[in-house]
Amino acid sequence: MGMEPIGPQNTPVVPPGVPEIAPGHTYGSVTDKISAIVLTRGTRKGWWVGFLIAFALLMVMHYAIAMVLFIGVGLYGINIPVGWGFAIVNFVWWIGIGHAGTLISAFLLLMRQKWRTSINRFAEAMTIFAVSCAGVFPLMHMGRPWLFYWLLPYPDTMGVWPQFRSPLVWDVFAVSTYATVSVLFWFVGLIPDLATLRDQAKKRIAQFVYGFLSLGWRGSAIHWRRYEMASLLLAGLATPLVISVHTVVSFDFTIAIIPGWHSTIFPPYFVAGAIYSGFAMVLTLAIPLRSFYKLEDFVTMRHLDNMAKMLLATGLIVAYGYMMETFMAFYSGNPFDRYMIMNRMFGPYAPWYWLLITCNIAIPMTLLWSSKIRRNVKALFCISLVVQLGMWLERFIIVVTSLHRDFVPSSWGMFYPTAIDFLLFFGTIGLFFTLFYLFIRYLPMISIFEMRELVHKTAEE
Amino acid sequence: MNDSLPPQYDRVQQGSLVAGVVLLGLSIALGFSNWTQFFRSYLVAFIFWTGMGLGCMAILMLHHMVGGTWGFALRRLLESGAKTVRLMAVLAIPLLLIVPKLYSWAAPEADRAAMPPFKRFYLSRTFFTGRTIFYFAAWIVLIYFLNKFSAEQDRTGEPGILRRLQNLSGPGLLIYGLTVTYASVDWAMSLEPKWFSTIYGMIFMVTQALSATALVTVVVMFLSDRKPLSDIVTPLLFNDFGNLLLVFTMLWAYLSFSQYLIIWAGNLQDEIPWYMARASGGWAWVALALIVFHFAIPFFLLLMRFIKRRKRILAALAAGLIVMSVIDIYWLTVPAFEPKGPEFHLTDYGTLIGIGGLWMWLFLSQLRKRPLLPLHDPRLEEVLHHG
Amino acid sequence: MRKHALYGLMAEFETADALLEAVRKAREAGYRRLDAYTPFPVEGLADALGFHTTRVPLIVLIGGLIGCFGGFFLQYYPNVIGYPLNIGGKPYDSWPSFIPITFELTILCAALSAVFGMLALNGFPTPYHPVFNAPRFELASQNRFFLLLEARDPKFDAEKTKQFLVELKAFEVSEVAT
């Protein structure tokens, strides 16, 4: 039982001569190189600069949250008809970003793609932090966030149960399952590396903390067998889970009958969009990290090239989604659908729509076909930022243009974000990077034991 | 090189041809009493077998892009399967000639003035015919080059050809996605011209990929006992095929359920009648059979390793999935003609097996032309030496 | 070191292959209470130790089934039996809308079973374990490979076993206190 890998001896499309790991490494050298970042090299100046900026932004988030708690959701730009504003846009954006991390660690594990090894750890970390950021928004959109537990099914004194037919309740289950499974998957992956840190640490406190967290791991062959089986099963579970999470997010829209939301293509197209923005975020993080910590031996050009190909593939599915929505709006003959599309393209939000098309389709979908650009680090970094902007705009367009002109022209309106909207959004970017900076400082950002395994397998070949 | 199809398949090939001609002939004979019914049956068979060839083409291109041991044993089968699309192009001609018999929007009594303007333009007989010709032209050109480069690779063994195949397959998959989407809208969705669904094309793509993978799994099972396939076919390889089938089965269920849930929850006048027809009367039983035999049972069986590694069991399962794919296409299209429930028509079986016979005949005759393994693919050489 | 305080003998090897070979020889020699420690999973090592199947998949299957049926019941009960409410004209038993949560809970319970099942079978957390007393054992999580022959093994004899391990060309052999 369980999903086993597809392609046991998968030979991915390898441009000859670009390995997953630079030659000349031994078990000891990979271990020392990665663990030294945590244990011995100390805190670098560049780390402090980045961390403090992120931390300052985190304080901005706290400010925004405090304001919303004290005064209320009236501080957001939302009103009728646009009752869903930045909160849902940012929620979907952050959740989507998380998805690439799970896919890299789970789906590529099932595919036995060796190139995942050096990026899976921080991609998983990225997932957890992105989900944490995502969680802020629905909570802070509730009006009375302290009553969030009403969403959970428990036999309460009011005798009322959550409305299980509502996709918003599905979301609670999907996102909390996703957060739990991501943390478990990440922690399980960390156990052997925590043991390595425990054994290498010189300071008493580090020995204690890493020792405590590694649960007494001693690398027994029998433990490894169970460990590998559990990891494989988790990967088999996490892959459909990722797909289901963004599918449920897409149901938040499609189950409603609003033109522009109620479209059957949404589930696969949202999933593709999520992976698209997620891989963009992995590139945004990996490119500076590998140069700052001199990890080019481990995160090679091949990784960047493969991720760029994933961007291309998922971006094309997103483009397919746009095309089908537009085509069906006309084919269906439904005047509201048709109006919604025309309004998106030529209405008051048209500049943002066309910017979205530029960022998501026009720029990346033309440039990424070229292998020269896929191997140009600076170009890739810029494209990754452009894609993230594009995917944010996509959610903005879907949410706002579908709502702001509904069936009755007398209730049309516009949505204008407020300062708090922006502060909360930028604040969560601070939360994300604060967590990320702490992660790269205190935990191995590359899976050490899997790198040793890679050294072993490469040597065998 | 004596690595091509063993001679005992001559009989199978001739048998397919005879069965195809006889059954199609009998169906045409039955057609003299009811041409409308004949063409309804013919349409279902045509959509299914065209999809089989296109599925082969898509999996072939996918393998060029991502590689993997699983594909080398399948490559020649997929190439031969894809070549049957030209047969389907010929078989499309009668359909194009009788469009008003099948499609209510083209029927003489249709009130075209009442149709929304875009639909009137899109669903016009000329445009429809033009599009179908265009789809087949695009597919045939694509398949021609896929086979041409591959034959060159067999002959010369030049490593650069792999690159060319990849450069063709990337855009090729894009073309495949677009053409199959619009072809499914044209040929199947427009049978009920009021209904629409944006996910529809993807369901067709997955069904095509699933039925093609299932078919080649069955064929590999038959060929795997002798050289050259016995050199590379292992239980692990069948495990891979099983996983592919599992992935496509799950995708099919995912897309079909998503469409159902969204339309069911929306409950809108434009959309829900399509499902009301398909979930009531006799069609409800067909729908239930699809859930159980197209998803639930194959899903659980394919989770189990011991099933995936026994080639005969896996092939039987794959054959079952082919049958369920036919029933799926039948359930998607035929309620347009028989809203009360499925009716029994001999022509349904005659055309399906008849066209299938011709398909098999062409498939096998293409398969015998070239060695069964793409021996000069640099990636296969790597597998044979290191695997 | 007194005899009853001896947990076993630990031999250190420099490569995975040497360890694998040593495990095979030790099994052939009749040792049954032995364990091997490596810095990464080594293929075939568990099999060489005589450990072939793990119960983790079964635990996951059971967890998944509990999540699946429990998840559906969690929604079916309040909507159909406990507190039926007409909402939006939808049927009480709106099974299509119960599928997403059923699915999520299946995955959640299966994943929890996978992690906690694995940890429990491995006996984690293990705050203290005798093998950590072995000198240089910290290298087992870095770049060295270790074989432990337990003193409880009927075949174990402090002198003969030490000799046996030395003959296996161990890099170092050391006694491990309980």
Image (cartoon, helix red, strand yellow):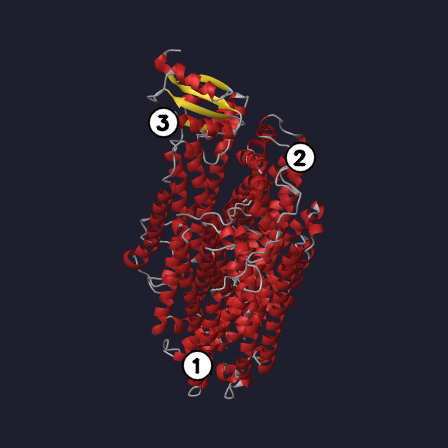
Read off the residue under disc 1. B27
Return the chain for callout 3.
C
Residue A66 placement, left or right of B320: right
- Element under label 2? loop
Q: x and y percent of residue A25 in the render? A: 62, 32
Q: Residue at x 45, y 63 (%)?
A: B256
- Quadrant (top left/top right/bottom left/bottom right) for the C terminus of chain B: top right
Identified at 50% across, 70% down, the residue is B361
Kindly indicate whether the residues beneath marks 1 and 3 are on one polypeptide chain: no
Q: Is residue B282 left or right of residue A120?
A: left
At x 49%, y 32%, the residue is A192
User: Which-is-in-front pick, marks 3 and 2?
Assistant: 3
Is residue A413 visible to the viewer in this orientation of the structure? no
- The residue that label 3 is drawn on is C32
* Marks 3 and 2, how far apart at CA: 46 Å
Mark drawn on residue A353: none
- Identity of the residue drawn at 56% across and 68% down: B180
State the separation of the CA atoms marked 1 and 3: 72 Å
The kind of secondary structure element at disc 1 is helix
**Camera-nearest residue between C173 and B274:** C173
**Dot 2 crowding, Cα within 10 Å, few <14, some 14–19, many 20+:** few
